[in-house]
Amino acid sequence: MASKRVLIQKLLKGIETGDAAAADVVNEAKYVQHNPQTHEGSEGLATLFARLSKTNPRVTFVRVFEDGNFAIAHNEYDFSSLRVAFEVFRFEDGKAVEHWDNIQPMMGPNPSGRGMLDGATEITDLDKTAANRELVRDFAERVLVERQLRLLDTYVDEGLVQHSPDLADGVAAYRSYLEASENRAFRIQYHKVHRVLAEGNFVLGMSEGYRGGIHSSFYDLFRVADNKIVEHWDTIEAIAPRSGWKNENGKF
């Protein structure tokens, strides 16, 4: 049986090729779709792939990793414009049965000259996967959701390498970003951490909250080294109003 790392790439290459057979990776009978703009099942994916392929898209895999039954891809999509995406699939018996994603337009470079997708790609420290997952989960819950910003230095390295398009390197810039307010409210508000996935030194947090008062999904990818967060990538996507959803499953 092919690894989940191979399967997720086979499936997502269907965006580029328009090959309906790519959707065969999906178990249509069980498939649960969490992209609000996509219909359920492989038929919905095949239709989507056929439509997207007409724009001559390119799918570039930058980071691909696994956590148990999950596969995660950090991609560049070139449709009519560049986009950055996190794609998450859950597999059973070699077939995809559930899907989440978070996509935003490519931006940057940021104030430190970094792009949204460059930086480290090598998966290391496999023996530390569980510990790194828990470190990021604690950070997300205590610092991002509960706003215990005094703990930021406990979790984040002073020289944090930052790929978020509006931020500079370093823990001080990250702190200022989390503290920023407008109209008497925090600009970034994390309300709930839905899932934390990891392989070795890479950990992805999938969270929900508000940015600038807009209901949004936050996908934050962290690289951990020596029990500290040392590098950060993200995508932020506005969650479509309920009236615009094409399935009933919700973003998370």
Image (cartoon, rainbow, N blue to C red):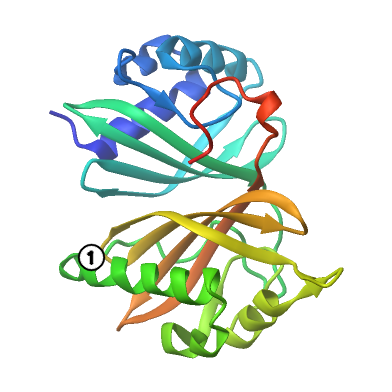
Task: List x then y, in percent, for residue 219.
Answer: 52, 54
Amino acid type for the residue under numbered disc 1: Thr
68 lies above or below 96 = below
Q: Residue at x 37, y 45 (%)?
A: 72
Residue 18 visible to the viewer: no
Q: Residue at x 44, y 13 (%)?
A: 19
**Which residue is disc 1 drawn over?**
129
Q: Nearer the viewer, residue 36 or 160?
A: 36
* Callout 1: SS: helix
Q: Nearer the viewer, residue 189 or 55?
A: 189
Task: List x then y, in percent, for residue 233.
Answer: 53, 62
1 lies above or below 179 = above
Task: List x then y, in percent, for residue 214.
Answer: 74, 51
Residue 35 visible to the viewer: yes
Q: Residue at x 30, y 69 (%)?
A: 134
Q: Is residue 75 left or right of residue 238?
A: left
Q: Is residue 158 left or right of residue 31?
A: right
Q: Quadrant of the N terminus?
A: top left
Farthest residue, direction left: 1
Q: State how many labels appear.
A: 1
Q: Residues within 10 Å of mark 1 (few under 14, many from 20)?
A: many
Q: Residue at x 19, y 64 (%)?
A: 126
Q: Nearer the viewer, residue 228 or 165?
A: 228
Q: Is residue 130 left or right of residue 154?
A: left
Task: List x then y, in percent, for residue 118.
Answer: 53, 61
